[in-house]
Image (spheres, rainbow, N blue to C red):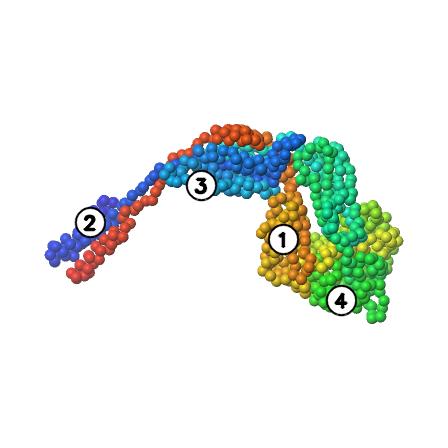
Amino acid sequence: MLAALSLTVVWALLMARRDTQEMHRGWTVWLFLLRLGAIATLFVVALNPHIRTQRNSYRPSQVAILVDTSISMRQPADDVRPGSAVVERAQVVRKFLENSPLVATLRKDHAVDVLTFDSDLRGPVTRFPWNGARDANTPEVPEATPAWEEWLRPVNNATALGDALDKLLAGQRGHTLSGVVVFSDGASNVGRSPDTAVARAKQSGVKLITVGTGGTLAPIDLAIAKVVAPTDVAKGDAFELIAWIQGRGAINQNVTVDLLQKGAQDASPMVVESQTILLVDGAGAQEVPFSRTMTEAGAFEYTFRVQGPADLLESRNDNNTDACTVNVFDRPTRVLVIAGGPMRDYIFAKNLLYRHKSIDVDVWLQTGRVGISQESDNLLFKFPEKREDLFSYDAVLAFDVDWKQVTPEQQQWLDDWVSGEGGGIVFIAGDVHTFELAREDEAMARVRTLCPVLIDDATVSSTVRDSAKQDFPVALTQEGQAAEFLKLDDDGVAESIWSRFGGFYRTQATRGRRGGVTVYAEFTDPLARGIDGPPPLIAGQRFGQGNSFFLGSPEFWRLRALSEEAYDRFWIKLVRKLAEGRSKRGLQRGMFVLDSREFDLGQTIPVRVRVLNEQFQPLVSGSFPVDIYDAQGRPLTPGLVLQQDRFRPAEYTGEFRADQPGRYRLEMEVPGLTERVREDLQIRLPEREFAELTQNVKTLSSLAEATEGRYFSLIDSNEGFQNLSGEIPKLLPNKGERIVVDQRIDETWDKGWVMGLLVGLLAVEWLTRKLLKLA
């Protein structure tokens, strides 16, 4: 670099002498000095002179407190003993961290981070700085009270202990993490095993100190695992309520299951039926059915209660009861019967439904003319001409209907009525018109979509109608055997009737079944099998909020030969099945559309409502409020405000999270209705989190031992808290380290005056040359 600089200086001198050889030597020196100044300035810039400042700093040692906030921490913190109060594991951990000097002691040598985990690692939820970092001259600022209750509330239904530990360790920078103090019951039901985290901790020299909570003796627990009950039934109809009872621990003894009933006018529930069952440990949940027939209308709350002997000591009793609400309505079910002609099933079914006291029947016989007489409440001669008139029905029975007499607009009403308003329709195959649904006719496109099966382009006769001389029995599928509407005998077993029934001679040929269709019964003629198996005799599907069914034979009247009572029950139960989404008369303009009525505690619950105005058009509003009441009947504040769905203007969506088990109630007020729309939800403790009721001491001990840490048992007492607060800090060495911190680099040449000097030298040289006429 010096050589280059010397050459540049010599070159500048030679150039100055050459340019001024005919002038005074003073100009030569002047031009050379100007050029030399510019070269010197550039040379200094090239050297990049700067001043670097550094300082020594102290990086404090760190300790992480990792707390389990999964739902399993709601279980008892210790073995249940006579006369002792049951305290949740999460409560004991919160009490310890809130009242013990552990955090304060740790802060003398470490900065303390508090993190939580369930299905994933969360936090730090808070950070307690190292006490040594405070400047003695800085006035002490009071710290905010830690929100332990909010931070440590169990909310999630899964535990990923291994993943949480590994994620915490992988996220640490440097080597100042002294240890992790884990508060947990040792459960881990999702994610990887803790082995990966243990290996990472050993590699980093981090101690894992585990503090276990929860009993170690196998507890005894009676529980109502599940309740099955209808939401709505007609007054006078029999219905069944089923409780599934589960026992854990050495039970093997008789327990009593009570059914309590409470009506709107009752001050308190009363026992209406009891059963005693032998609950065997390890045998799984046992089914306990109750049958009821209500003679009064209204909403009835049913509570199931399981009780063991007086000397049976359970680990928890919050799962010994469960409740549901059954709405008994006394309004008649409105049925529209449409028939393409007076086929036998139309005649028999229409007459028996008309005679039923809780069913109103309107009839449209498409071949009928003014002046005919049909047993019905209203005799029609055309399809309902107003949308509101159609929407007033609960079910439609379509006997071999000529759909060409129903306009495309009316077919769209029918689609909306089923999908959006919970209506139910059944297609009964016949000889004359059913096959027309196989044709790609745009005039019947909406009806074809409603039908659960793909009709083949042939008349009713998978066996030719005129030559069918043999009947074939009905084969119930597994779903058919379980279907309530196919249980036509008093014993409640579907097979008892259908196995004695001779069967049908013919059925409608089909090309396939739509996705999501449930087949309940099949035709057994081997010659009738198609590419998708035997033709369906009875099939159904959920279509939006409603039901769509298909009966593949016009010969269901043959059931009367076996039992007229069974035939009557079939049609009445089928109508109830079709109308199950329409049982709340007057409330069809507002309904809750829920994915389920049972959710796990901690699960985010999506809520969707459908609201229509008095003309059954979408109620347009930017938002819609819903009131939520928890298991104790207290309203959640603030209430849930649903937002309008951009693609479904009649629907509003939102979500909330339930923080305690039990029955929640959702209510909303629809403009123009005097009665509020209500829906109940059951919030259950997640089975996965309660599969293991004892503390997993083995897992917690192995974590500590593998990393030179130590396992402690959390004892709910002042003495226990003090001992633990003194022992844990002794195991965690101070791993703080002094480090050199680079400060800013001050580049001394990067100044405005340097640039000004360089530009000035060059400008003066240029001006001089200009005046001397050298430029």
**Observer-nearest residue: 330 or 139?**
139
Q: Quadrant of the N terminus?
A: top left
Classify mark 3: helix, strand or loop.
loop
Point 61% across, 36% down: residue: 87
Work out whether mark 2 precedes mark 4 in sequence or the reverse, and give the earlier one: 2
What amino acid is labelled 4 in the image?
Answer: Phe
Looking at marks 1 and 4 on the same chain, the residue that comes earlier in the sequence is marked by: 4
Residue 5 in picture, x, y percent from top left: 22, 47
Q: Is residue 51 above or below residue 542?
A: above
Q: Label 3 crowding class (10 Å Cα cut-off): few <14, some 14-19, many 20+?
A: few
User: Can you say whether 346 is above or below 499 in the image?
Assistant: below
Q: CA distance from mark 2 to mark 4?
A: 108 Å
Q: Residue furthest front?
A: 267
Instruction: Report which residue position mark 3 lands on.
Output: 142
Judged from the image, the secondary structure of the residue bearing numbered disc 1 is strand
- Secondary element under disc 2, as helix, strand or loop, is helix
- Which residue type does callout 3 highlight? Pro
**Foreground disc of the pair 2, 4:** 4
For the residues labelled 3 and 4, say whether their Cβ atoms are less than 8 Å apart.
no
Task: Give the image location of residue 95, x and y in percent.
Answer: 55, 36
Q: How many other residues sit within 10 Å of disc 2, few (<14), some (14-19) or many (≥20)?
A: some
Between discs 3 and 4, the one toward the N terminus:
3
Q: Earlier in the sequence, mark 1 or mark 2?
A: 2
> Would you say 389 lies left or right of 20 here?
right
The CA distance from mark 1 to mark 4 is 39 Å
Label 3 to label 4: alpha-carbon separation: 77 Å
- The three-letter amino acid code for the residue at tag 1 is Asp
Provide the residue designation for mark 2.
9
The amino acid type of the residue labelled 2 equals Val
**In front: label 1 or label 3:** 3
